[in-house]
């Protein structure tokens, strides 16, 4: 079923690396002014519908992310997000595979785990490497000035992934990168067989990150502790903590059905389909001209 | 000097990296959907001339470099320094061999050169795009040749060697593109 959820919300996300646009609602019937946020994705609202028993749903929605602009980023972009009840992340990857083949005329995708890719391209195991190991590897790849004083393992992993691995994967056919480390699980479940990794995946093709998906976390306690941890990280990096979305938490408390979901960047998909070099070529007016 | 954040990086901005003034050539934003944002920056080190890529965390800042370009006329060399003059203020500046680099072979008296100053001292001398120099030595060419073929080497008054068409002779003044080091034409009389 196609759904539509609000672009403006009273609550935003705790993700340390996302910055939401904030605006102020002036009500004609109440003196209280209220902060509203443009959604960075329709995830919470769609999950509330899933909790309310909607069944499988999809949405083509505008998403908004502040502080993001460049060849492959525009602060306002279009997302295709959908959820499949009863699917796990691997079944959802198969469905994405079909969609990509029909739109991009590409061959079926390959699957590799995050761990496999690091071992193959950087010659170390990201699940066991210490911070010192990571600093050393990052220095060896030419990022010494950044790595020297960096104390976040995940930041160094993301640096190596986006600068060393990403340019080398998914060139001939799309690739699904699976089993992201538990520390980068976002809203995915941990793998019950190996708690070091999560049931989160990303799809890459021709150097472009196309989609991010999860076997959705439906454990409210785990979700609550991740939110709290992220808010602590926000404070540590001098960002305002985010008020947790009580509607989302209460829906999760009610119960999210077992499902998998994915968000796919539609502008990037169009870019690949028409062979464009930048996102701006797929938009009537990008942010520079909006 | 002021500090510049990664979102202020743009082509032409001069910043300090590894103790050396650098010119920013390109600034690309790299960010995974879930994860840290980076700025991948292509820079030219102004003293060594090396071009390289550096990655910064988005939001990081870097010290600016006090670098400015100035247009000066070349006067003369005393063997150790090359002297240039500002035609409006008559102020003179001396550049050493390191700042001159390969530009030495394109210096013509009274030509206007671009001198890059770092903290007031010259670090790079860029000659005009075209200079006119006399050929001091080249093999006599074959009559009737117009252009094409491989040409022949010619030594110029500054010691520079360029390939010239066969019909150009010793004693003639030619126009050379200093960016490529290639012959452009005979000089206008």
Image: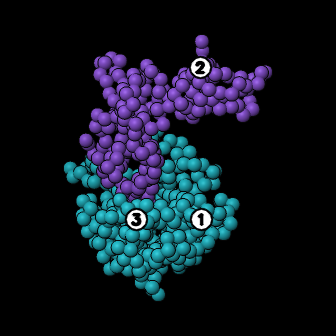
Chain colours: A cyan, B purple
- Spatial separation of the CA atoms under disc 3 and disc 2: 52 Å
Residue A104 located left or right of residue A150 = right
> Along the line of sight, which residue is nearer the eye, A47 or A128?
A128
Q: Please identify the quarter of the rendering in which residue A190 is found.
A: bottom left
Say which residue appears at 67% left-offset and 63% top-offset. A106
The kind of secondary structure element at disc 1 is loop
- Are discs 3 and 2 both within one chain? no
Q: Chain of mark 3?
A: A
Residue A243 in the image: state x and y as whole percent. Answer: 27, 64
x then y, percent, for residue B61: 30, 50
- Label 1: few (<14), some or many (≥20) within 10 Å? many
Q: Residue at x 58, y 74 (%)?
A: A111
Q: Which of the two residues, A18 or B170, is positioned nearer the viewer here?
A: B170
| Chain letter belonging to callout 1 | A
A269 versus A47 height, above or below: above
Mark 3 or mark 2, which is nearer to you? 2
| Mark 3 burial class by Cα count in 10 Å: few <14, some 14-19, many 20+ | some
What number is the disc on residue A139? 3
Q: Residue at x 44, y 44 (%)?
A: B49
Q: CA distance from mark 2 to mark 1?
A: 57 Å
Quarter occupied by the C terminus of chain A: top left
Circle 1 residue: A170
Residue at image location 39% in from the left, 31% down from the top: B79
The circle drawn on residue B173 is 2
Are tags 2 and 1 found on a single chain? no
> Disc 2 vs disc 1: Cβ atoms closer than 8 Å?
no
- Closest to the observer, B154 or A234: B154
């Amino acid at each position: 079923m196609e759904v539509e959820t609000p672009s403006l919300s009273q609550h935003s996300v705790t993700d340390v690396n996302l910055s939401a646009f904030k605006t102020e609602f002036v009500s004609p019937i109440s003196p209280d002014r209220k902060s509203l946020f443009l959604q960075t994705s329709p995830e919470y609202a769609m999950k509330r519908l899933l909790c309310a028993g909607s069944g499988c749903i999809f949405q083509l929605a505008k998403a908004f992310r502040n502080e993001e602009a460049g060849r492959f980023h525009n602060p306002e972009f279009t997302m295709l997000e959908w959820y499949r009840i009863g699917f796990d992340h691997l079944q959802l990857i198969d469905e994405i595979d079909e969609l990509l083949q029909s739109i991009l005329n590409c061959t079926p995708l390959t699957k590799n785990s995050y761990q496999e890719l690091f071992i193959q391209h950087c010659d170390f195991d990201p699940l066991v490497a210490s911070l010192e190991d990571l600093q050393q590897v990052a220095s060896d790849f030419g990022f010494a000035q950044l790595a020297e004083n960096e104390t976040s393992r995940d930041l160094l992993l993301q640096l190596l992934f986006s600068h060393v691995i990403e340019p080398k994967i998914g060139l001939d056919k799309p690739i699904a990168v699976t089993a992201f480390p538990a520390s980068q699980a976002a809203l995915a479940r941990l793998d019950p067989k190996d708690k070091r990794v999560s049931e989160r995946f990303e799809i890459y093709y021709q150097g472009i990150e196309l989609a991010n998906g999860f076997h959705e976390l439906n454990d409210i306690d785990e979700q609550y502790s991740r939110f709290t941890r992220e808010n602590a990280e926000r404070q540590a990096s001098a960002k305002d903590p985010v008020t947790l979305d009580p509607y989302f938490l209460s829906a999760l408390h009610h119960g999210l059905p077992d499902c998998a979901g994915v968000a796919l960047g539609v502008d990037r998909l169009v870019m690949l389909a028409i062979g464009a070099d930048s996102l701006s070529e797929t938009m009537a007016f990008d942010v520079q001209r909006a | 000097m002021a500090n510049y954040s990664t979102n202020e990086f743009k082509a032409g901005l001069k910043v300090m990296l590894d103790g050396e003034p650098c010119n920013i050539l390109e600034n690309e934003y790299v960010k995974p959907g879930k994860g840290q944002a980076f700025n991948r920056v292509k820079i030219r080190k102004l003293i060594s001339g090396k071009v390289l890529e550096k990655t910064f965390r988005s939001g990081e800042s870097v010290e600016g470099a006090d670098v400015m370009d100035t247009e000066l006329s070349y006067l003369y060399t005393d063997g150790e320094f090359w002297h240039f003059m500002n035609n409006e203020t008559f102020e003179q500046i001396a550049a050493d061999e390191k700042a001159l680099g390969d530009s030495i072979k394109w210096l013509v008296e009274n030509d206007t050169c671009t001198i890059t100053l770092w903290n007031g001292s010259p670090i790079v001398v860029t000659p005009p795009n075209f200079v006119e120099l006399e050929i001091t030595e080249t093999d006599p060419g074959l009559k009737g040749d117009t252009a094409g073929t491989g040409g022949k080497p010619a030594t110029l008054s500054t010691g520079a060697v360029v390939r010239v068409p066969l019909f150009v002779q010793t004693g003639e003044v030619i126009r050379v593109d200093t960016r490529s080091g290639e012959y452009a034409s005979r000089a206008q009389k």
